[in-house]
Image (tube, coloured by chain):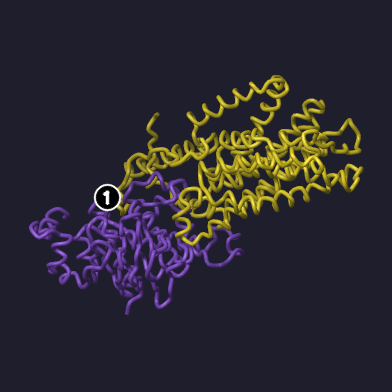
Chain colours: A purple, B yellow
Amino acid sequence: MSLIDVREVIKHYGGIRALDGCTMAFEEGAINGLIGPNGSGKTTLFNVLTGYERPDGGAVHLQGEDITAFTPDKVFARGVGRTFQLTRVFQRLTVVENLHVAAQRTGGFRAELSRWSSGSERARAKEVLDFVGLTRLAAEVAGNLSYGQQKLLEFAAIMIAEPRVILLDEPAGGVNPTLLSHLASRIQALNAEGTTFVVVEHDMEFVMGLCHRVCVMHQGRALCAGNPEEVRADPMVLEAYLGTDMRPMEHADVEVR
Amino acid sequence: MAVIQATPELLSPTEIDRAFRDPYALSARTRGISWTVLLAVLVMFPLVFTNPAVTSVAVFTMFFLLATVAWNMFSGYSGYISIGHAVYYGFGQYAVALLILHLSITSGVSELALLPIAGVVAAAVAVPVGLLVLRVRRHTFIVLTIAVMFIFQLLAFNFPSITGGSAGMNVAPPTWSGNDFNLPFYYIALGTAIIALALSWGIRRSKFGLGLLAIRDDEDRAKGLGIRVTRTKLIALVISAFFVGIAGGLYAIFVGQVFPQFAFTPFYDLYLAVFSFVGGLGTLSGPVLGALVLGPLQQYFELQFGATTLYLIIYGVLFIVILLLLPRGVVPSIADRYHSLLAAHWRRAEERRSRSGPATPSAVTTGEARTESVPAVPTVREGA
């Protein structure tokens, strides 16, 4: 069953058709991959899904509910969290404060007045930091962390809110192999507990190894979808994205690990 | 700049535990003692230095203290640098002046009872003004707040039937004795400033305040993490305007005159901004430090060189020097240094332990241990 349904979504920027009647579905409980060449509309689709951009046409449904016109905070309240292509953490807040920003913002204004560091939330923040391995950096200002650590922090800040679906925009970009495998194992562990993922990524090894299902985008539309083996072998994908003459898979194997 | 060796991975368990509870660099006990000492000094000051010339400077300093703490509650925490808080200052002044005039109030005590009304009027004005100016960010926001402030100044000039226009308004002076004339103003301003400070402290520890700080760092991401940004910013602005309105009301009664160009004045916000920037924008103690040190200085300059406004150049130079040397202000810079020293201390302790005892496996799991940490660079310095 699909958790997120994207139907005929159109988004123009001036003369550029970032999304041109894009229709695709992301399965509940799966790690969904989303690949495609630069400019194929992956990040725009993320922006539309999370309310950062209002599409010019079409609709987005989350478990049957139309969330097309929702603002980002409403989308988040429905259980959709995302990370950004260029990592965004709150630079001048500490690691712990970064986590608390996202945690439990559901209690209305009375809850807003309570301390952010109350007992139960403190324990939860500790747990999440342990999970991603950043506990000993808890007191550090987020802007002082390395890029990879910031990626982990951004991820942790999303997962503390326990969303049903997490959208990751290029989680592997600029992350070293050790940290990347750590991140992959964290994604798999969360997925085993029932969290749905949608992962935009250019690192083919990472996507094909991690995802249960892969959608391919090209020029603002869905090109095809299927399990990693099918997508890998699809001639349309090879032509549109991977290139027919490059035999990219072998290349990627050498390059990444 | 010296590279500060800080290995955050080696923070002590106590330090880590505190990080989960407490946003401040110093321990609760140190902070408690410092605030108590400061409070005692401020309470005793006009009793020790009874010269009216001195206490009058102290009164203006308290007015600044109150307004700076209030300004920081909005601009410091949210990063929206307002140069239009004189709107609320001016409305506080005119509210008090008009009420005293039309209600024919003569007793000094009931004049002071009007102060909360001045605050409420200013807060009420902040709602529509906020809904307008909070639609834009950063530099545009600064320009827009100035524009709105001048609109109100022009209105005050051009409705002489209500405001007296450029002739201004006289406020009937309070009736208490001239010898201790300054004291009630001093203590009311101090008391209100303490209330504002307590509120500022509460905001810093609340989810609401954390939301404001998140908006300061990255508003779009804050929105994506469920923070209702417009509501959060507006509430902070209204609270801030309330206290600035009270400061305006106090000023009007103390000085006894209200003029459009001194009520809705651009200099007022420059003072509040400079005081906050110097002390440390968005910190609890920074605005207090800034107002208490630079407030009297401002008074001194105005008394000495008030005939011309050339003394403002000194303020400009000071502002530039602070931005160059301590871009985040005095308090955060000291806190940073303290953190680095603490981290270095724990690193040395850890080294000693590992030399003397058997090697313990490191708890670092991310594989990206950094050996040095660069002092935090502010990403954007709004309003610089």
Badge 1 sits on which subunit?
A
Q: On the rendered image, what quadrant is the N terminus of chain B found in?
A: top left
**Which residue is rendered at x = 60% and y = 23% of the image?**
B314
**Residue A131 image position (x, y, % from top left):** 36, 61
Question: Looking at this view, is B141 or B334 the one in front?
Answer: B141
Question: Looking at this view, is B171 or B43 the one in front?
Answer: B171
Q: Is residue A41 above or below residue B325?
A: below
Question: Looking at this view, is A240 or A182 the one in front?
Answer: A240
Label 1 Cα crowd, 10 Å radius (few <14 / some 14-19 / many 20+): few
Question: Looking at this view, is B256 or B146 the one in front?
Answer: B146
Q: Is residue A198 above or below residue B248?
A: below
| Figure disc tally | 1
Q: Is residue A159 visible?
A: no
**Residue A7 image position (x, y, % from top left):** 34, 72
- The residue under label 1 is A174
Quadrant hosting residue B257: top right
Q: Amino acid at mark 1?
A: Gly
Secondary structure at badge 1 equals: loop
**Residue A107 image position (x, y, % from top left):** 56, 67
Quadrant hosting residue A58: bottom left
**Which residue is rendered at x = 55% and y = 24% of the image?**
B317
Q: Is residue A111 visible?
A: yes
Determine whether, in the image, residue B276 is placed left or right of residue B60: left
**Which residue is rendered at x = 28% and y = 61% of the image?**
A200
Q: Is residue B221 above or below residue A214?
A: above
**Residue A106 image position (x, y, % from top left):** 53, 67
